[in-house]
Image (cartoon, rainbow, N blue to C red):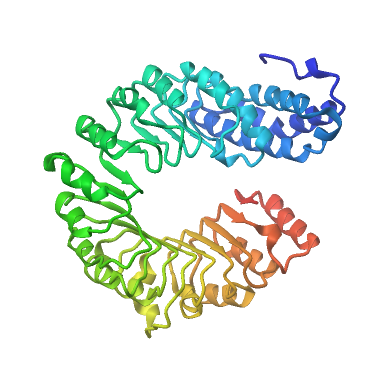
Amino acid sequence: MRKSIHDLRTAVSLNKVTNYCTKELEPLNFRMFISSLEIQKRIALDAILIVDKLITKNERSVISIGHSTYSAISSIIMENILISYMEHLDVTKLKNRHSQKALILNIKWLKGILELTLPENCPALPEFTRDMKYLKKLEKFQLLTSCTDAIIKRLGENCPNMNYLNISFSKKVTNECLQNLLSLKKLTYLNISSTYISIDTYKIILNQLKSITNISWRENGIEEILTDIDEEILKHKDTFEGKIKAPKILVGRCPNIVSLTLETSEIIDLTPISEFGTLENVTLNGVNFALCNVVNIFGELGIFLSSVYLKSIEELNVSILVKYCMCLHSLTIENCKFSSDEINTVFAMPHFQNLTKLSLMSNTGDRWYINNVKYYKDLWTLNADSVEGFDDDFFKEAFENGAFTNLHEFTVRKGGRISIKTANLLIDSCPDLKVIGYLKEWTGLTPIDTEMIMEKIRENNYNLKVS
């Protein structure tokens, strides 16, 4: 213990906070004592999430003790659960602002950290910038919207092993940090989209840091970048993220793209994308499926694709994906408007045998497709938000069809009426189930039902997390 929590006896609710923390962390402390180093790292992450809940649960204490005292308490609690050999940390998983700040204020203790993700509009940035001198092993860093030239300077001075850097949408990152970026010789991924770094500066970076394997540029002018960079350098790029008006230039200059993310609200013929011979992962955002000839991409390359992410797509003909994306493992459809196209006998198609991850969020006109989701035989992950067709009757029929029995993760919210019947089906029929998400938001569950489900999990000692 670097400090004692009891140093802050003046806090009105401190004893309550301390007792709650001790009780919640006691099982983890015992496991930490008997576990290997790798397991200890995972337990430490669990402890951080528990403390996040603790800080959230006692947040009304802020009214009586004040923000500064409560922040101090939060910081001390967080400090005492961190272990210096933690290697991976995603602060965005903490939902409470006090928790995030407390963790960032104690970042100096994590001298073994390799991967760090900070939240947008990050708190305690001056303190973090100051303490970056302790993060000499850092290899992967992500900070959207809030990064600064000063932080890039610290990375250049202290993090020689940095290979992944995503600082997109950070308006305080400018051309002034060029030399610091160029000092990161091991970079393989760099995303500076929507910062104040100019096209000319980005071209310098790509020309000099030849180990970078991605091109990420969400502003206009990507054609200029592609035209001015040496063709031999571009042959080594396997990832493209951004806007484009001339896809033929992209295909011609970067023939070895494996992962493609296209954002556009313009009507552009995307047929040239079908000429990529190495494409495995496709993300499309803001595209009109029909007018942009997206059907030509999936018709030609669908059999080779491993993952597809479709966001804000107009006239989405999902039957094209079902027909041509036979080996697809991951499919995400978010905020899309489906077309009325349908096909028959979908249950016999390979697409429904191979998909392992499906995410459906806030779509419209998707009734035909939703009716056929019950034919996915080998799903490991099902995520859904605002899918009206997902109710007790749907899941009963799905399990009767032999679907969903391989689920590891089930997170469904704001759909149809889901009750304890579906919860019991999941628990009894899915031996590998690890996560049930948004249980408390199910409209067919009473508080008594929820307690019965939790009791069933405890009595049978299931390795199942409910959130």
Q: Position of residue 456 (x, y in %)?
A: 71, 56
Quadrant of the frame with the N terminus: top right
Question: Considering only vertical position in the picture, is 171 above or below 161?
Answer: below
* Residue 353 visible: yes
Q: Position of residue 33 (x, y in %)?
A: 61, 24
Q: Position of residue 442 (x, y in %)?
A: 68, 64
Q: Is residue 70 left or right of residue 101?
A: right
The residue that appears at 22% across and 58% down in the rendered structure is 246
* Residue 235 visible: no
Q: Is residue 317 left or right of residue 301?
A: right
Question: Considering only vertical position in the picture, is 42 above or below 161?
Answer: below
The residue nearer to you, when weighing 149 against 276, is 149
The residue nearer to you, when weighing 352 against 426, is 352
The residue that appears at 25% across and 40% down in the rendered structure is 213
Q: Quadrant of residue 423?
A: bottom right
The residue nearer to you, when weighing 358 against 94, is 94
Give the total of numbered labels.
Answer: 0
Q: Is residue 179 left or right of residue 408?
A: left
- Residue furthest bottom in the image: 344
The residue that appears at 84% across and 31% down in the rendered structure is 16
Q: Position of residue 304 (x, y in %)?
A: 25, 62
The residue nearer to you, when weighing 418 against 55, is 55
